[in-house]
Image (spheres, rainbow, N blue to C red):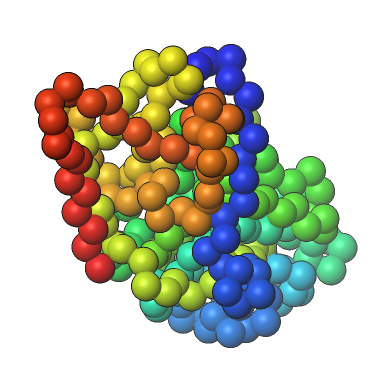
Amino acid sequence: KTDDAIIDIKKSVLCDYSGGPKALGMESGVIPDEDITASSSYSQHSVGPQNARLNRELSGGAWCPLKQLNDRESGTEWIQVNLRDQYVVTGIAIQGRFGNGVGVEYVEGFWIEYSRDNGSTWHKWTDQNGDHKFHGNTDTYTVLSHELSHPLVGINLIRVVPFASHQRTTCLRLELFGCKQRDLPVVYSMPDGYKSGRFGDLVDMTYDGREDSHGYLSEGIGQLVDGIRGDDNYKVNKGYEWIGWKSDGEPNSSIQIIFQF
């Protein structure tokens, strides 16, 4: 992909079999209180993580971490949802703390971290340009929804990590959207695609595992399982949805891709 490329991101179809992405249960209570935890809370009873349910006014009205955030402290507080199984997450919605009209706190922005192995390994979600920050709310009651440009696949833990550029109290409520994962690899390994091609870099832009000094990808997943189908002509959209390799000129040369389920 060239620096001036305009990428038209297509939607993932991974959740289409069930009628599209659905709310995963923060607002409804399907996700129980014990599966919602946090790095800290200003008051466990009043603004603990169990109160961070979208559109609900529970106790103090949201989750609020113990300390205020600023540019230096951003990234030190988080709220975590345990999905208990492998899920595809396609979107998130957040609100501030309305608190029945007395709340004044909301998040300026946030990023998402996720795990597929019950917290042993964490990844930070980034888009195709390497950006990881989402805009937050501007008031305490409006629902702000974000559709992920590529879904989180096969995750069982997700964290929302608020940030602030200036000293402030941050509080939030949230909902997650997606579906149960079906029959997808948990890891694939391969040589990364060809860079600096005529029609863009045909590399795995969203691979979240390791890349060694030879460009070999391992211990992660990316565009091959995101459910986003590219145009039949790979030159369209600067080749973003495609991964490709340059022939070494040898007859019968091949690329090996290893999928683990």
Identity of the residue furthest to the right in this view? 101
Identify the residue at horizontal 13%, vertical 30% (top origin).
Answer: 251
- Numbered label tally: 0
Identify the residue at horizontal 46%, vertical 53% (top origin).
Answer: 226
16 and 63: which is toward the camera = 16
135 and 98: which is toward the camera = 135
Q: Position of residue 2 (x, y in %)?
A: 50, 17
174 and 227: which is toward the camera = 227
Q: Is residue 252 above or below residue 258?
A: above
**Residue 39 seen anywhere in this rendered image of the structure:** no
In the drawing, does residue 146 fall left or right of residue 72? Answer: right
Q: Position of residue 110 (x, y in %)?
A: 57, 44
**Residue 246 seen anywhere in this rendered image of the structure:** yes
Quarter of the C terminus within the rendering:
bottom left
In the drawing, does residue 189 fall left or right of residue 128? Answer: left
Q: Quadrant of residue 233?
A: top right
Q: Position of residue 84 (x, y in %)?
A: 40, 78
Identify the residue at horizontal 66%, vertical 63% (top origin).
Answer: 173
162 and 12: which is toward the camera = 12
Q: Quadrant of residue 102?
A: bottom right
Q: Position of residue 122 (x, y in %)?
A: 32, 52
Identify the residue at horizontal 50%, vertical 33% (top origin).
Answer: 234
